[in-house]
Image (cartoon, rainbow, N blue to C red):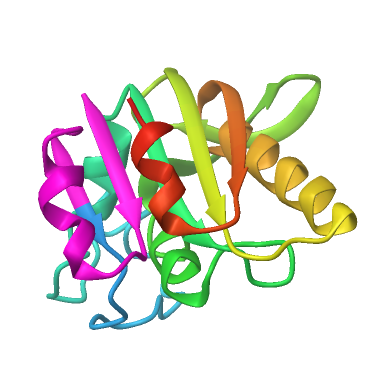
Amino acid sequence: MRVIIHDLDTDYEKSLKTKCNQLIYASGKYASCQGCLGCWTKHPAECFIHDNLQDICRMIGRADELIIITENCYGTYSPFVKAIIDRSIGLSTPLSTYRGGQMHHTLRYGEHKIIKVYVYGDILEQERITFEQIAKRNAINFGYRKSQVVFVKHPEQLAGVIE
């Protein structure tokens, strides 16, 4: 299953829907994570906030391929995409294990293929390095075997890049 999270204008929705099983628009019309950790303990992988992101952990957890399309914001995700990632903490459990020689939370949904991050906008060399490190760390934390980051200047250039 392929899941796309994006912060693009709604004009891109139609073409993106043909490239995935689940499309999540980072519109900002949802609540921020409250940090209650209920998605870890009380009701695993389900947020107590009843909005469009209530089942985000399950959506991402079932994805073999996760694609994130985001504007560059100082070398990281846009605030709306970051809010979605924050709400997905229930992908893992509160228990810990070693993965890649480091301590990480135990995965709730097992291992996945790849996380691809498509970044658009102006970006400095140091921001590129930071973004690649963040994508790599997210891949480990979310249980993806590898990560890939693609940089483009304008969102229109993504049409030929995303298969």
Query: Measured from the top left, where is residue 22 in percent x and y?
Result: 16, 42
Asked if one can make out residue 17 in the rendered structure from this viewpoint, the answer is yes
Residue at image location 26% in from the left, 38% down from the top: 3
Residue appearing at x 81%, y 20% in the figure: 101
**Above or below for 156 versus 116:** below
The residue depicted at 59 percent of the width and 28 percent of the height is 147
- Left or right of 147: which side holds 81? left
Whether the magenta-drawn stretch holds residue 3 is answered as yes
The verdict on residue 123 being magenta is no
Q: Quadrant of the N terminus?
A: top left
To which quarter of the image does residue 36 belong?
A: bottom left
Residue 132 shown left or right of residue 71 in the figure: right
The answer to whether residue 121 is left or right of residue 60 is right
In front: 41, or 56? 56
Picture quadrant of residue 16:
top left
Q: Magenta residues?
A: 1-23
